[in-house]
Amino acid sequence: MAERDWDAEIDRWTERFRDVPNPPEPFARALRDGWDPDARAQLAAEAAAYAERTHGFLSQVAEAGWDLVRFDAKLGSCGVCEKYVGKAYSLRGEHPQLPPPPPLPICPACRHTLNLMTPFFMQSTGMDVDELAAEAQPFEDDWR
Ligand SMILES: [Zn+2]
């Protein structure tokens, strides 16, 4: 897993969230009042821990042979991440018509999840992989 520089990402996302309608906390507060050093350090630590946890979980899922996952919003979604909510991804590349999943967390504040799409779940949605692919949302880091 590539190490992410959370300090640099927090700077970058603070700027990005200036243009986003509903910035998540603690960014919303930081945009109003400036960064509180403790809040910022806590966010960086939580983001790093979350990245490590989700990486461990997804490694296990992939090793167990599962490929189809869905991006879900756990605590609501910010204006950047919401377009990925409900979209399907291919964890191991076994469904080439689907894109690889976004990195988690996408932004330091978000706590989205990637959840297994089991055959039972697929059946309950009434959608097949080609229909999921038709509405797929590849992750793109479209802001600098
Ligand atoms: Zn987000």
Image (spheres, rainbow, N blue to C red):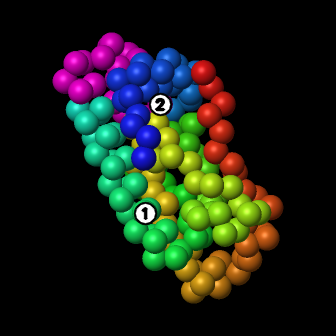
Q: The residue tagged with tag 2: helix, strand or loop? A: loop
Residue at image coords 44%, 40%? 2
Q: Which mark is residue 32?
A: none
The image position of residue 51, as x and y in percent, is 37, 47
Question: Which amino acid type is shown beneath numbered disc 2?
Answer: Pro
Measured along the vertical axis of the image, is residue 66 above or below residue 41?
A: below
Magenta stretch: give its range.
23-41
From the viewer's perspective, tell me whether residue 61 is left or right of residue 92. Answer: left
Query: In this orientation, does residue 28 appear?
Result: no
Q: Nearer the viewer, mark 2 or mark 1?
A: 1
The image position of residue 95, as x and y in percent, is 70, 68
Query: How many numbered discs sit on the rendered protein?
Result: 2
* Residue pointed to by mark 1: 59
Q: Is residue 45 magenta?
A: no
- Looking at the image, the residue that sits furthest to the top is 34
From the viewer's perspective, tell me whether residue 14 is left or right of residue 120. Answer: left
The image position of residue 79, as x and y in percent, is 56, 37
Question: Which amino acid type is shown beneath numbered disc 1?
Answer: Ser
Q: Residues within 10 Å of mark 1 (few under 14, many from 20)?
A: some
Along the line of sight, which residue is nearer the eye, 86 or 96? 96
Q: Is residue 37 magenta?
A: yes
Query: In this orientation, does residue 139 appear?
Result: yes
Residue at image coords 50%, 17%? 15
Along the line of sight, which residue is nearer the eye, 51 or 131? 51
* Residue pointed to by mark 2: 23
From the viewer's perspective, tell me whether residue 33 is left or right of residue 58. Answer: left
The image position of residue 91, as x and y in percent, is 57, 63
**Marks 2 and 1, how far apart in space?**
30 Å
Magenta stretch: helix, strand or loop mostly: helix
Q: Residues within 10 Å of mark 2 (few under 14, many from 20)?
A: many
Which badge, 2 or 1, is on the more N-terminal residue? 2
Quarter of the rendering containing residue 85: bottom right
